[in-house]
Structures are given as C-alpha cells and as structure tokens.
C-alpha cells in the first residue's frame, strides 16, 4: 500500500504538492483505492474520496501504531565515496533501518564538494532518503545531515553508547561488541580506507574496531552489511 508522510489533523485530509502529484500522475490511483499516511509514528489507513485540481482528498478509515522502527538508533558516518555510490548507500541504509546518515570528509576521500555543491547535493540526498522511508514504510523521516570533516564527526559520537570503526585492517567480530546498546555510531571509510592516524583518533575516543569478515568490502557494500548485522544482533531482523 502506498505510504506518505502527511500531517493528519482530522478524519479527512487533503493531500497536496508532490505527494498529490505522485498519487495522481505516477501511481495513477483512483477514487476508492487505499493508501497510508504516516504522522508522528502513527499509520492512518485511508481511502481516496476525491481527486481534484487542488490535490487528493482521503478519508481516514483506521489508525494504527507504526511498527517498522527498530529499537536501536544507528547513526551512519559514511566517508564520501566517488560518483553516485553515496546515493545507493542512503537508499538501502534507510530501508534497513538506519536512524541518521552523516557524510564525512576524511583524508582519503576523492569526492570533496565545495559548500555550494554540498548544499545542493544534500537536498537531493534528503529526497532520496524520504523516498526510501515511504517505500519501506518507516515511521519517521530519516535525515541526511550536512557533510562534516572527520574530527567533527568523531566529536559527535560521544553521546552514543557505542561507536564502531569498521576497518579493513582487522578487528573484533561484531558479536563480541554489540549487545543491548540502544544508540550506536558506525564509521565507514572511503575507497582508500582510513589512514592510520584516523584509526588512532577513533580508538582514542573510545571507538571499538570491528571486522565484517575476511573479505574486503567496497565502501558502498560495507555500511549495508554492518547495518544488517547490527539489526540481527539486536533482534531487529
């Protein structure tokens, strides 16, 4: 059933803007068809009652709690990869249940957009995240933060119960690190990996170094494997 984030204040809702255009022109939905509106972690099961120039009017049939959110908050600190790889990471990480995504500029990042380009890219990144939230039935919108430098990223992790550095140089198995933590920050390096200095900075800040197995994963594969493994270890999958 199509899923949209729309503010719901009563039993009848007029959907406008991009959501209405998507319902009318992309999905080509008709009067009588059903869709889900999500607001404040509640799912409103609705039926289309009118399609007009102003938008799409729906009637609320039922209200249910959204049960798709995991009970562990994972913040992904992804060092920016080349090309469009980061867009794939955003889409799939949101589907898997990540709570926040932060693009990071580390010493070996090839992609280094300036402030103007970064802002424009961030708008697109958040649209991709929103679309993934709707497609996967998430109960809240997931933010892609503005890009930051490596040391700023490390300083942000102090409020998390656990910070994990995934490092191709080896580390402990995840099952020895992840237990019942409810807030976890994970760091994934760019194509060239982390420098030794960056590894030391993270470890000195309290991060645990972990491995994702004996194979070296691509920068766009590693975060998806890490999130999946954490979800499994915390009984969220």
Image: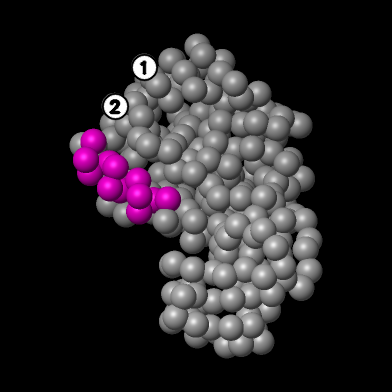
From the top left corner, tell me how far across and down residue 152 is, in percent. Answer: 40, 21
Q: In the picture provided, is 1 more to the left or to the right than 125?
A: right
Distance between mark 2 and mark 1 Cα atoms: 10 Å
Q: Is residue 119 magenta?
A: yes
Q: Mark 2, mark 1: which one is toward the viewer? A: 2
Going by the picture, which residue comes out furthest to the top?
204
Q: Check contact, mark 2 vs mark 1: CB within 8 A.
A: yes
Q: Earlier in the sequence, mark 2 or mark 1?
A: 2
Indicate the secondary structure of the residue bearing disc 1: helix
Residue, x 35% and y 46% (percent of image)?
122
Residue for badge 2: 107
From the top left corner, tell me how far across and down residue 190 is, in percent. Answer: 35, 38
User: Which label belongs to residue 171?
Assistant: none
Residue, x 57% and y 70% (percent of image)?
14
Residue for badge 1: 197
Q: Is residue 143 magenta?
A: no
Q: Residues within 10 Å of mark 2 (few under 14, many from 20)?
A: some
Part of the protein shown in magenta: 115-126
Q: In the picture provided, is 62 more to the left or to the right than 158?
A: right
Image quarter where the N terminus lies is bottom right
Rendered position, 3 above or below 202: below
């Amino acid at each position: 059933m199509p899923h949209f984030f729309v503010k719901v204040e009563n039993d009848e809702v007029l959907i406008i803007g991009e959501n209405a255009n998507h319902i009318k022109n992309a999905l080509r939905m008709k009067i009588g068809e059903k869709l889900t509106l999500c607001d404040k972690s509640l799912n409103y099961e609705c039926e289309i009652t009118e399609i007009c120039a102003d938008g799409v009017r729906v009637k609320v049939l039922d209200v249910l709690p959204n049960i798709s959110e995991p009970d562990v908050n994972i913040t992904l600190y992804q060092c920016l990869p080349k090309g469009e790889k980061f867009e794939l990471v955003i889409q799939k990480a949101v589907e898997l249940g990540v709570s926040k995504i932060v693009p990071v500029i580390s010493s070996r990042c090839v992609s280094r957009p300036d402030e103007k380009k970064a802002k424009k890219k961030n708008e697109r990144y958040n649209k991709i995240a929103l679309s993934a939230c709707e497609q996967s039935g998430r109960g809240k919108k997931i933010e892609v933060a503005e890009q930051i430098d490596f040391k700023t990223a490390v300083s942000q992790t102090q409020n998390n119960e656990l910070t994990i550095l995934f490092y191709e140089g080896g580390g402990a198995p995840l099952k020895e690190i992840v237990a019942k933590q409810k807030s976890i920050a994970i760091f994934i390096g760019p194509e060239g990996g982390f420098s030794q200095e960056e590894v030391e900075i993270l470890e000195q800040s309290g991060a645990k170094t972990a491995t994702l197995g004996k194979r070296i994963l691509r920068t766009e594969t590693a975060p998806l494997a890490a999130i999946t493994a954490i979800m499994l270890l915390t009984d969220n999958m």
